């Protein structure tokens, strides 16, 4: 019996310890795809006049590789002549007057605080984790079984924050 | 000793080569995609382009849950083998493929009939469910399946294997494992392929097989048909039986001649499939044949968007263990019992939400057996017998971000032995590169018709199996996974023969079981790929079933090696030339080899052996689709004898010598 226990411990230790210093080689989230969606969300959403001037600010709540992709997008694109400005923040209190907040998976628990802060301001909350539209986010990304990237919408929340998305993009939303 | 050294050095070389490749992660070649149109959004994937290995791992596996999940999250310890794996391996038959699966091992039943053991447990009789295209092919009298130059490997698209219990889904023939062979025809093949194999040992014929498979789509219709015919000889060695007779097996005493036909028709969600198989074998004393015909109709009816009903009707007709003696005086068949099963199954799959699926249903089958020789096989004046079995099953699969939870159970009620209930629970999840599976399942073996015939009050055998798998994907091309298992079996059904009364019976023994570990390492590069596996088992110390025990070696079971190493490699040179080495190393095995003067079986030892195969093939030779392959099997000429895995009165089938095989395959896509 001793031999199997020793062997088991060695194998488990090997898998767990090797895993700790080999990072980032596996099939990972393609944040370029997420950033393309986000670009289209901005392009096909009418913000109230009070939020239609100046740079279009996207706050990324939590450390995420999407920030790099959004910065690349910001370097190439604008929205109706408005430049994009990307801010990665750790705390809800640091989002400032962002037009959109991307909530990374690790910060999903901060959604309630975020809603409390935004109240009725025209700020769109987009969550990386699926299902959070049911908890008040405006949009949540959904990864289907075939790895297709889609999004869910919360029409009531959009209306609440005076965000008007075009029918053409709403038609692409995932519905159960 | 020299062989041991060669094997050890080979394994070391392979291990060094594989580990050296850790430091070469693939680069992301993604293009600038920010100009996608709105319509293009629905084409976007959430993850970066999968490597070949990731694609294989992401492919849905249904065998362990009836609901497709990727192999790293599927609620079972699962092995999958693709047509490409089989092609590179140069597999001559299914044994070449399955012997490389961790935990699976072949052994002799009686009269040179070959069956499977799983994780050190002899499993041939009613403990491993074999299916072709989802249709069970175990015969219904003893619930066995025989191997050796039998099933057409070149016609296989994919094999899904549960190396653990499957009763909670499949019932009483899946206590230790499930093997589902999915044919190319059933995979909507649109083309035609012909494959021929000729094998020769030095001085004796080994095998010749030919197979043809074709499939064609017409709109919603798909039709496929496959034919396979062959001849084979398991060995050319001298065989000495326990009782003194001696023959050379090349003289027709180890034949394995298959005939196999598989046809299918699909129209939208309806499908029909029929399989005919006839397998002729010989041993030193008997000719033993197996015939079966099975047909299944299945319809996946989408009652609502989220609810699919699947009725299926299956007819199974087996003529197993149909035998007669070789010698003239006894040249009439001694056993010809036909088993039939009429089965109806209705299952419902309800997607309550995207993350919550419920599968439930019921099954009924009627088993019949008829002694066609009218030898009163089932008792005085009784030549036919019938049983009924009713089942209910349910499974819930909840895919949560923390873990996937599977809960399921199956209840069977059999008209002879009564009720059996087997629940299971599984927790699985892939978290980035890491995945885990924590599984617990009960399983059972339903006594077969002949078990009940010999011992009407025999009880079902029950197992409880716990498994833990951990895996880590080091690079997009490389995966290491390992699992621990613990199997405890109670009321073990064991064949017995009372010499004094000359009576056979099946008895329930108190308990047995094994525990162990299995490790798999896979790497898939663009020009080469390799897989290295290791499996280890030890018998539980309180095993009470004497027929499986090795005297003086409490941690071993008869016939099964404690340690097994498997390796498969494929290296492409240029555009079309492939070199494919493979090996199976087995540690020492113990088995009974002869009788002593007092007619007591003598325990013997089969030395550790390393079976090395080398297969090369050239694709698109002269014309597109034509592949010519040549292989040398058992290159080191080691003793790969097939022992009994219990105390059953048969000496190991001596298998030795190199086999040289030529394979020619032509494939034309329509």
Image: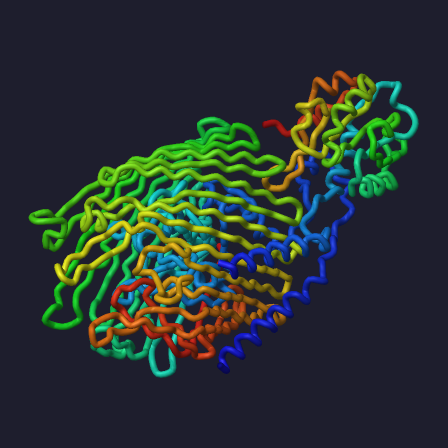
Pick the front one: B163 or B455: B455
Pick the front one: A166 or B239: B239
Q: Residue at x 10, y 54 (%)?
A: B375
Does residue B229 appear in the picture of this structure? Answer: no
Q: Where, by quadrant of the figure, is residue A130 drawn?
A: top right
Q: Which residue is at the far right?
A: A54
Q: Residue at x 63, y 36 (%)?
A: B401
Name the spot of residue B230 as percent of width and height, x first.
33, 66
Q: Residue at x 29, y 40 (%)?
A: B343
Residue B654 drawn above or below residue B435? below
Left or right of A76: which side holds B366? Answer: left
Residue B384 drawn above or below residue B623? above
The total number of labels drawn is: 0
Left or right of A105: which side holds B543? Answer: left
Does residue B431 appear in the picture of this structure? Answer: yes
Pick the front one: B495 or A159: B495
Residue B111 drawn above or below residue B417? below
Left or right of B92: which side holds B75? Answer: right
Name the spot of residue B622 as percent of width and height, x first.
53, 71
Name the spot of residue A4 as percent of width and height, x first.
51, 59
Q: How is the image coloured?
A: rainbow
Assign the C terminus of chain A to one quadrant of the image. top right
Name the spot of residue B10 as percent of width and height, x first.
56, 74
């Amino acid at each position: 019996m001793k031999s199997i226990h020793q062997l088991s411990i060695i194998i488990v230790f090997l898998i767990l310890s090797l895993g700790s210093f080999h990072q980032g080689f596996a099939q990972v989230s393609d944040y370029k795809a997420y950033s393309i969606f986000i670009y289209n969300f901005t392009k096909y959403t009418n913000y109230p006049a009070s939020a239609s001037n100046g740079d279009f600010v996207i706050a990324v709540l939590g450390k995420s590789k999407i920030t790099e992709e959004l910065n690349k997008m910001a370097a190439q694109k604008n929205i109706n002549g408005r430049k994009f400005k990307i801010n990665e923040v750790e705390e809800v209190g640091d989002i400032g007057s962002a037009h959109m907040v991307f909530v990374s998976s690790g910060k999903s628990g901060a959604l309630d605080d975020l809603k409390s802060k935004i109240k009725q301001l025209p700020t769109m909350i987009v969550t990386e984790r699926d299902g959070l539209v049911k908890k008040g986010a405006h949009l949540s990304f959904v990864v289907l079984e075939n790895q297709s990237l889609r999004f869910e919408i919360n029409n009531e929340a959009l209306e609440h924050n005076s965000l008007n998305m075009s029918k053409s993009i709403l038609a692409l939303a995932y519905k159960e | 000793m020299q062989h041991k050294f060669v094997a050890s050095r080979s394994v070391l070389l392979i291990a060094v080569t594989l580990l050296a490749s850790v430091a070469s992660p693939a680069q992301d070649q993604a293009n600038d995609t920010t100009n996608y149109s709105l319509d293009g959004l629905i084409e976007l994937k959430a993850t970066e382009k999968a490597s070949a290995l990731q694609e294989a791992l992401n492919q849905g596996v249904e065998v362990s849950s009836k609901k497709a999940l990727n192999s790293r999250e599927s609620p079972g310890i699962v092995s999958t083998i693709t047509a490409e794996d089989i092609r590179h391996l140069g597999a001559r038959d299914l044994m070449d493929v399955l012997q490389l699966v961790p935990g699976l091992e072949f052994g002799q039943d009686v009269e040179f009939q070959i069956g499977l053991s799983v994780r050190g447990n002899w499993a041939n009789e009613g403990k491993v469910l074999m299916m072709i295209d989802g249709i069970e092919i175990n015969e219904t009298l003893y619930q066995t399946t025989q191997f050796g130059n039998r099933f057409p490997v070149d016609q296989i698209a994919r094999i899904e294997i549960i190396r653990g219990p499957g009763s909670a889904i499949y019932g009483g023939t899946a206590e230790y494992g499930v093997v589902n062979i999915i044919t190319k025809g059933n995979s909507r093949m649109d083309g035609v392929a012909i494959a021929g194999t000729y094998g020769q040992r030095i001085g004796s014929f080994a095998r010749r097989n030919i197979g043809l498979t074709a499939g064609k789509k017409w709109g919603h219709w798909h039709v496929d048909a496959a034919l396979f015919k062959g001849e084979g000889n398991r060995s050319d060695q001298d065989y000495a039986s326990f009782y003194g007779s001696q023959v050379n097996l090349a003289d027709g005493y180890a034949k394995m001649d298959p005939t196999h036909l598989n046809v299918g028709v699909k129209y939208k969600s309806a499908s029909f499939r029929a399989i005919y198989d006839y397998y002729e074998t010989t041993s030193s004393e008997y000719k033993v044949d197996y015939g079966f015909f099975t047909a299944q109709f299945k319809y996946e009816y989408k009652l609502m968007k989220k609810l699919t009903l699947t009725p299926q009707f299956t007819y199974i007709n087996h003529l197993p263990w149909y035998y007669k003696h070789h010698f003239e005086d006894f040249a009439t068949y001694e056993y010809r019992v036909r088993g039939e099963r009429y089965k109806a199954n209705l299952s419902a799959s309800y997607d309550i939400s995207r993350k919550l699926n419920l599968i439930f249903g019921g099954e009924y089958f009627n088993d019949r057996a008829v002694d066609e020789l009218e030898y009163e096989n089932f008792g005085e004046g009784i030549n036919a017998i019938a049983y009924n079995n009713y089942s209910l099953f349910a499974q819930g699969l909840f895919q949560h971000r923390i873990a996937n939870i599977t809960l399921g159970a199956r209840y069977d009620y059999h008209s002879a032995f009564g009720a059996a209930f087997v629940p299971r629970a599984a927790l699985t999840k892939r978290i980035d590169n890491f995945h885990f599976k924590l599984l617990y399942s009960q399983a059972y073996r339903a006594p077969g018709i002949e078990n009940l015939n010999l011992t009407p009050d025999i009880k079902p055998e029950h197992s409880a199996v716990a498994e833990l798998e951990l895996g880590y994907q080091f690079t997009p091309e490389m995966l290491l996974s390992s699992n621990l298992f613990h199997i405890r079996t109670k009321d073990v059904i064991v064949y017995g023969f009372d010499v004094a009364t000359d009576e056979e019976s099946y008895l329930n023994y108190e308990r047995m079981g094994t525990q162990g570990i299995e490790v798999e390492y896979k790497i898939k590069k663009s020009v080469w790929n390799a897989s290295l596996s290791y499996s280890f088992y030890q018998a539980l110390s309180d095993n009470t079933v004497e027929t499986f025990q090795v005297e003086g070696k409490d941690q071993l079971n008869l016939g099964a090696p404690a340690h097994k190493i498997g390796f498969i490699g494929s290296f492409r040179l240029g555009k079309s030339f492939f070199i494919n080495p493979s090996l199976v190393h087995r540690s020492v095995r113990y088995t009974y080899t002869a009788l002593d003067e007092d007619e007591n079986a003598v325990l013997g030892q089969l030395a550790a052996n390393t079976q090395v195969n080398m297969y090369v093939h050239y694709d698109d030779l002269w014309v597109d689709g034509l592949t010519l392959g040549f292989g040398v099997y058992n290159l080191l000429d080691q003793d790969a004898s097939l022992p009994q895995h219990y105390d059953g009165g048969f000496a190991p089938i001596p298998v030795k010598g190199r086999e040289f095989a030529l394979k020619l395959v032509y494939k034309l896509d329509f």
